Amino acid sequence: MRVAWRAVVELPRVYAMCGIEGGKLAVAAKCNDVGVIDPAAPLPTGVHWLRGHTDQVRTVQPFGSDRLVSCSKDGSVRVWTAQSEAHTQASDACVGVLRPPSGCHVNHVAGLADGGSIAAAGSDRQVYVWDAVTGELRHSFSAGPAGVFSMAPLLDGQLACGGGDGVVRLFDVTSGRVTAALAAGKSFVHHCVTTPDGDIVTSDNRFLRLWDGGARLRLHERFLQAQTGAWGVASFVAGPGPAFVAVASKAYDDNVEVMTSQLKYACELPETAGHTVVATTAAGNLVTAGPLAPHRGQAAGDPDAPRPHEVCVWARAW
């Protein structure tokens, strides 16, 4: 695979990234704001910050064709317009604020397949589902005994939640009923993503697993060679054929590895050692990002201070 776009951007420690409308990238970093990067903008690439959260942003996700959702330790979920770089005031860019009644930290958020609902999981081990238009809290239900460590909407409208007990629970979001429980490991399920084909990819500290999204059966399993788990997991399409899976290892000297839909080795992405984030653009391109050396790993000074990050968008063709 080849790089279609590469830039160096000043960012705090990055937790998550996602693609939004117009080829832009949204960033959740260790700060109170949501960053928006536009690869089409003239270099040097800057970051437009959406301000409104009052504590650390945990996750960003696309929602529909023209919106973005974020969640924060401040106990809120915020809905933003995707064309937000045109706004200078947070009140203009933010079109909705949702809060769990318990006031808990919100660690994960996802827009559901119906296009009109937003789900979030908090530190109180509950899942909340809101009407995205009215802001009404439709449902809340228990996420399981060990809370939620990852979350992904399924194509059939259900919600997959990776638990701290090594179980991925699939929920009917209208009733809160668990429709399936997938034994995805013995430790925290740090990542849970859906592929463009509708299957489910999970990872714990040691294994990457692929599940049939319809039959809920484990199809493939791969040992993570670094033995330290993965910083990030993403599924993307490169040319015709089934989806691929990209894994950013917690071993800083390893490049991002690309696997087939059977979790077999396909290639490594050159010069991506230290890239800790993998994501996809709205068009399906793979994105990788990470701090430039010598800032990766045990960097001197404040490890959360803004520092140069390399962001790469990869061409879909091999």
Image (cartoon, rainbow, N blue to C red):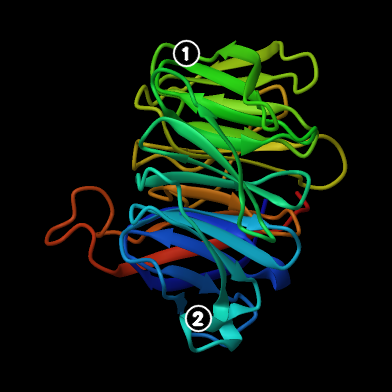
Looking at the image, which residue is at 75% across and 23% down? 213
Q: Is residue 187 above or below residue 20?
A: above
Q: Is residue 197 above or below residue 102?
A: above
- Looking at the image, residue 294 sits to the left or right of residue 149; the answer is left
Secondary structure under the numbered disc 1 in the rendered image: loop
Q: Tag on residue 91?
A: 2
Residue 212: x and y in percent read 75, 19
Name of the residue lying farthest toward the right: 240
Kindly identify which residue carries mark 1. 185
Camera-side mark, 1 or 2:
2
- Looking at the image, residue 84 sits to the left or right of residue 228; the answer is right
Residue 104: x and y in percent read 35, 44
Looking at the image, which residue is at 71% across and 11% down? 217
Find the distance from the CA under tag 1 to the CA under tag 2. Answer: 43 Å
Q: Is residue 289 visible?
A: no
Secondary structure under the numbered disc 2 in the rendered image: helix
Looking at the image, which residue is at 75% across and 54% down? 316
Residue 285: x and y in percent read 70, 55
Q: The residue under label 2 is which amino acid type? A: Ser
- Looking at the image, residue 300 sits to the left or right of residue 61; the answer is left
Q: The residue under label 1 is which amino acid type? A: Gly
Q: Is residue 163 visible?
A: yes
Mark 2 Cα within 10 Å, few/some/many (few <14, many 20+)?
Answer: few
